[in-house]
Amino acid sequence: MKNPRNDQTRGPFDYSGCIHVHTTYSDGTGTFTDIIRAARRQNLDFLISTDHDTLDPLQTGSEGWHQGVLVLVGQEVSPPTSHYLAFGIKKVVSSNPDNPQAYIDEVKKQGGLGFIAHPYDRGNPYLKVKSYPWTRWDVSGFDGIEIWNYFSVGMEFGRSLPRILFGLMAPGLVRTGPRRETLAHWDRLAQERRVVGIGGLDAHAVRRKVFPGLAVTIFSYQGSFGTVQTHILPDHPFTGDDRKDCRLVLETLGQGRCYVANCLQGDPTGFRFWGVSSSGFLAMGDEAILSEPVELKASLPQSGVRWDLYRNGSLVATGTGRSLSYLALEPGAYRMEVFRQRLGRFLPWIYSNHIYLRAPQG
Ligand SMILES: [Zn+2]
Ligand SMILES: [Zn+2]
């Protein structure tokens, strides 16, 4: 089995981060000082900015540790449709509207990581917000998909005034998670190769004037940072060195050793999903040949939950306890969804990455 790791107890470490943040370098309303302050207030470990078609923040020393928050500067490649989140690149990638494969390849060429952004975005006709879906699926070589874009899903939810008011007043009670078609597409791709799922915010902290002299901020940075986070589970801790730690975040994301959670439903820290067989330990994102049964295990940080285990997009087990033990006898891409019970309803909380158990060749 590839990647045997037999000591589950010495780690991995769990770092919380927010991905897909816009600042005044593009169409966000906050500076890096503002987003770092908001990140500190939400106890984030890391933050990835993704301004539209610019890497200028790299020139002004924005990347690295700032008051206990590790900031990574990425780019959102932003043609009219098919937006792409590019991390770990040094030169701006051109957004060629006719050819997403060109920018996917360019990110790879620079040694970066690339994620398809808000793939099934629908905009909001009621608020006259345009949609920005991914339109070309005949591409290859992207590292992953933004499976949950909080702003995109929230926009779709707010398609009437009562819904908007409910969403603004009680965001934690809104039963929206990743779109099912995004998850279904992700599950299909995962049957072929590793495709990492991340959560994004698309935080802009949009300011709107309601009356002369009174402006409100919609999806503020601090508020957004307390919603959809991506937690990474690296083997070793941060060192305090800017370059090494940025690399650790990107490597861990690229390996798929991460999960996505809506923290309005509770702190997900401590969530684990792993596999064990007689030949070793499998973390999320690991691929192995299923030559013998693998026990899939999970532990959940809180009670009052329901979990669902999926194989190739089909539900294979469900439960309400704080742990899972499932003997996987069939090959497939396995992942978990966890729902938190609030006011008698189960609300989307945690989405794992896949563990890939491939069929033996021949
Ligand atoms: Zn976008
Ligand atoms: Zn964006």
Image (cartoon, grey):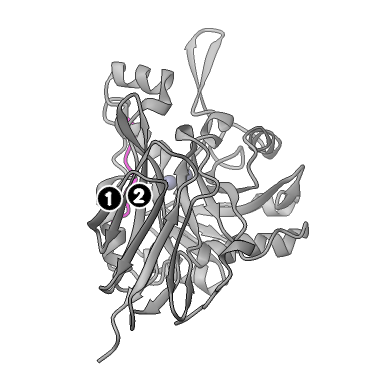
Check residue 262 in the rendering and tell me which mark sits there, or answer none.
none
> With 290 as the anchor, is 65 left or right in this view?
right
Residue 178 inside the magenta-drawn segment: no
Q: Which residue is mark 1?
A: 318
Q: Nearer the viewer, residue 166 or 308?
A: 308
Marks 2/1: CA–CA distance: 9 Å
Q: Tell me the crowding category of disc 1: few under 14, some 14 to 19, or many 20 or more residues within 10 angstroms, Cα based.
A: some
Q: Magenta segment, which residues?
A: 128-135
* Residue 152 location, quadrant: top left
Q: Residue at x 54, y 49 (%)?
A: 270
Residue 52 in view, yes or no: no
Q: Which residue is mark 2?
A: 337
- Badge 2 vs badge 1, beta-carbon distance below 8 Å: no
Q: Where is 222 relative to 64, above or below?
A: above
Q: Residue at x 35, y 28 (%)?
A: 174
- Give the amino acid at mark 2: Glu
